[in-house]
Image (cartoon, helix red, strand yellow):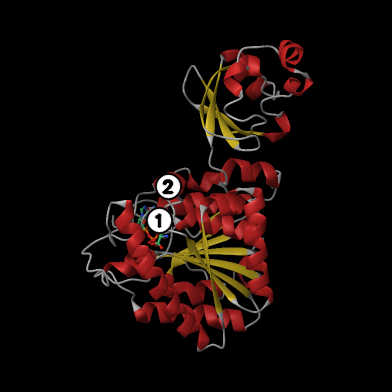
Amino acid sequence: MREQVTGARRIVVKVGSSSLTTAAGGIDEQRVDALVDALGRLATGGREVVLVSSGAIAAGLAPLKLPRRPRDLATQQAAASVGQGLLIGRYAAGFARHGLTVGQILLTVDDVTRRAHYRNAYRTLRKLLDLGALPIVNENDTVATEEIRFGDNDRLAALVAALVQADLLVLLSDVDALYTGDPATPSARRITVVRDENDLADVSVGAAGKSGVGTGGMVTKVEAARIATGFGIPVVLTAAPLAARALAGDDVGTLFHAVDHRPAARLFWLAHATSPRGRLHLDAGAVAAVVARRKSLLPAGITSVDGSFVSGDPVDLVDAGSGLSVARGLVNYDAVELPALLGRSTPELAAALGPGYEREVVHRDDLVLL
Ligand SMILES: Nc1ncnc2c1ncn2[C@@H]1O[C@H](COP(=O)(O)OP(=O)(O)O)[C@@H](O)[C@H]1O
Ligand SMILES: N[C@@H](CCC(=O)OP(=O)(O)O)C(=O)O
C-alpha cells in the first residue's frame, strides 16, 4: 500500500491522447467512461480531483475526416477546436452520472509561467474545487502558436499540480509503467519505484509510442515527474486502465518519490516553469562571476543580447564562448534599453544616464543556475 497515494487529498490526474481516442482518430467512448468512473468515485469520496486531459487534436481527426495527426499548426488548431468540445461534452455527460459538474480550463504557457497570470489561473481552479466542480484542463491549442506552445501536457500537468499544491500527480498513458528501456524489447523491466535521480541513471527513455497520437513519449513524462517531485509532489505513472488500482495505492506502475529538501519554490519555478524571452551572452569574466561566485550580472560582462523582453521577464544567460545556457534569471531592463549599456561599468552608466542605471541587469536573488 502506498501511503503517499492513499493519504493524498488533492490529486491531479493527467491522461494522454492515446488513452482516450481510437486509432481511427475519434473519442474512444468506453475508455473515457472507464476513466470517468474511476475519477468520479475518487471525487465523490471526498478527494479534490483536477483532470488534465489531452486528446483534443486526436478527437477532432475523424469528424474532420483527417486520416492522421496533421503536421501543420493550423490543421492541428482546427482539429483541437473540434475535438476539445466533443471531449468535454463526453466528460460532462460522464461525470454527471456521478452527480459531478465539470469546468473547462484552457491554459496557455503564460497562464502557468507568468506570476500575474498563474495567480489568476490558480484562483479559478481553487474556486471550481471550492464549488465542488471537477476542473478539466488542457492547453489552449486553438490559439497556441509554435513558439509559445507547451506541445506536451505532461509538463503542463506538473505545473498545474504545483499551482494547486496537489498532494499527488498521476500520469496515465498507454504503457503501464516506466521501463528500463523501450517496453517493446523483451529485456525491458518495469521500474516500481524511483527514489531519486540515481534510480534513473540506467533508464533509457524514448519518444512517443505506437499510438501515433501521443506527443512527448516517456521523455516528457520523466521530466514532468522531475518537476513535480522537485516541488514536493509524489508521482505515479501507469496505464489508464490501471487508474483505479493506482489511486487505491496498489503497487502498479512506477512511483516517483518527492524530494525531501525542496529548493526555494520561486527559483525552482524560474528554472522549470518559465520559458526564456531572450538571451544575454556573457563574456568569460561574467560567466565566472555568475556561476562560480554567485554574483549579480552587470552590463559590463554582457557582449550581446537577443530576444524581445521587458523588465521582469525570464531570460537565459548564455556563455558566449560555448553557446551553452548557464543560468536563467529575471531581467531588470527592457531588451531595447540594453544595447546602449553593454560593456560599460555601473559607475560610468550612473554618471552618464542617472542613478537608476546602477542597477544590476539580473540580481543574484533572481538567478538560478541551469
Ligand atoms: N523507458 C520507457 N518506459 C516506458 N515507455 C517508454 C519508454 N521509452 C519509450 N516509451 C514509450 O512512451 C510511450 C508513451 O508516450 P506517449 O505515446 O506520448 O503517450 P501519451 O499519449 O500517454 O502521452 C509508450 O507507449 C512507450 O512506447
Ligand atoms: N493539447 C493536446 C495534447 C498534447 C499532448 O501532450 O498529448 P499527449 O502526449 O497525448 O499527452 C491535445 O489535447 O490534443
Give whichever of 103, 264 is nearer the camera: 103
Q: Residue at x 46, y 47 (%)?
A: 148
Mark 2 touching mark 1, by CB under 8 A?
yes
User: Which of the numbered marks, if any, corresponds to residue 312?
Assistant: none
- Give the quadrant of ligand 1: bottom left
Amino acid type, mark 2:
Val
Asked if residue 174 can be seen in this view, the reply is no
Q: CA distance from mark 2 to mark 1?
A: 7 Å
Quarter of the image that includes the C terminus: top right
State the residue at coordinates (51%, 48%). 199
Q: Position of residue 134 (x, y in %)?
A: 58, 75
Image height of 162 relative to 44, above or below? above
| Residue 240, above or below 232 | below
Residue shown at the point (52%, 51%) measured from the top left = 109
Task: Decide which of tag 2 and tag 1 comes sooner along the chain.
Answer: 1
**Residue type, mark 1 in image:** Tyr
In this rendering, the answer to whether 272 lies above or below 32 is above
* Residue 207 image position (x, y, % from top left): 34, 50
**228 and 162: which one is in front?**
162
| Label 2 lies in ligand 1 vicinity (Cβ under 8 Å) | yes
Identify the mark at residue 179; answer none if there is no mark: 1
